[in-house]
Image (cartoon, rainbow, N blue to C red):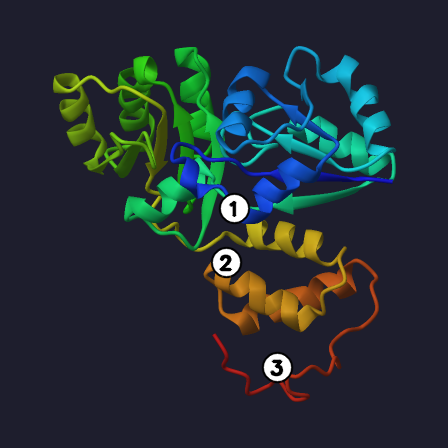
Amino acid sequence: MGVLYLVSTPIGNLEDISARGLRMLREARLVAAEDTRHTQQLLNHFGIRTRLVSYHEHNKVTRLDYILAELAQGDVALVSDAGTPALNDPGYELVLGALKAGYAVSPIPGPSAPLAALVVSGLPTDRFVYLGYLPRKANDRRSALQAVSTLPYTLIFLETPHRLEEALADLQTVLGDRLIAVARELTKLHEDVFRGSISAGRTHYAANPPRGEITLVVEGCTIVAGPWSETQVRAAIREGLGGDQSPSRLASGLAAEAGWARRSVYQLILEMSQEEGRQDLSGEQTDDQPEDTSGDNIA
């Protein structure tokens, strides 16, 4: 019984493939590739003769059973055209099918355009959201941007050169003139990263039409929202009480998120618990909630 290996391949520079990735491409009984012509060039470069089969958006349903049958005989390597498979390609369905059939799935990490662009962007890397390609139609694109406009996380998109100008215009309209990084042709000969405001980016690319593959990194929302209303806090408490958190921990988490004093959130949790006929929690003992809370002044 084989293992489905997700083998990351270069996004440009062929030297970026790992030794383990090359070994697995050699040892697998089959390589499932998004574009066999593209992958064949990679295999030929490294002198690898493993059998290839196509697995892409248009044959992912009909080819699934074939690949699962191959897995029954031994290891299969899945690759995309470039970077990490199962991101923006049909690899997800194959991974899910293999797991449902009881096969092990193992990643062989390596190049990834979204992560490479993020770490060179100069924008915060501790919290980010990867959103793939922006919609092609303007209305759909603006709606998608509106849905993430208040997220405090760095946003990562893929874009094509001929749509970059329209995308930047919609970004500025919906999100405001935020900081961005436009990473082109990463790890390739003509690698280039523009860093600056969206408006500056529009000016730059109007004078210098972009070429090549593009990853767009956008600053998250930096507007600080005001404290939550009591209605919002009650709704969050109601949802939280359905989980397995203690009231004390729930109060600590919500206080930071809602901009409330922890003591006030904790008291509201106790009131709501009693109102809804839950067990009396006023005597709860935790590491961060003392027995006598009458003098508690924790914010």
Dot 3 falls on a residue whose secondary structure is loop
**Residue 117 as seen in the image, left or right of residue 55:** left
Label 1 amino acid?
Answer: Ser
- Quadrant in the picture for residue 52: top right
Q: Position of residue 212 (x, y in %)?
A: 32, 21
Q: Where is residue 121 in the image (x, y as percent from the top left)?
A: 30, 44
Q: Do the residues labelled 1 and 3 touch (CB within 8 Å)?
A: no
Mark 3 crowdedness (10 Å alpha carbons): few <14, some 14-19, many ≥20: few
Label 3 amino acid?
Answer: Asp
Label 2 amino acid?
Answer: Glu
Residue tagged by mark 1? 18
- Mark in the foreground, 2 or 1: 1
Mark 1 crowdedness (10 Å alpha carbons): few <14, some 14-19, many ≥20: some
Q: Where is residue 174 in the image (x, y as percent from the top left)?
A: 33, 27
Q: Name the N-terminal-most of marks 2 and 3.
A: 2
Dot 1 falls on a residue whose secondary structure is loop
**Residue 67 as seen in the image, left or right of residue 192:** right
Name the residue located 81 percent from the left edge and 38 percent from the top edge: 99
Residue tagged by mark 2? 257
**Residue 109 as seen in the image, left or right of residue 173:** right
**Residue 95 as seen in the image, left or right of residue 139:** right
Mark 2 crowdedness (10 Å alpha carbons): few <14, some 14-19, many ≥20: few
Dot 2 falls on a residue whose secondary structure is helix
Residue 275 seen: yes
Distance between the alpha carbons at the discs numbered 2 and 3? 18 Å
Q: Residue 295 carries which label?
A: none
Nearest the camera: 62 or 69?
A: 69
Nearest the camera: 32 or 142?
A: 32
Name the residue located 45 percent from the left edge and 46 percent from the top edge: 128
Can you say which quadrant of the picture contains the N terminus?
A: top right
Residue tagged by mark 3? 288
Q: Name the N-terminal-most of marks 2 and 1.
A: 1
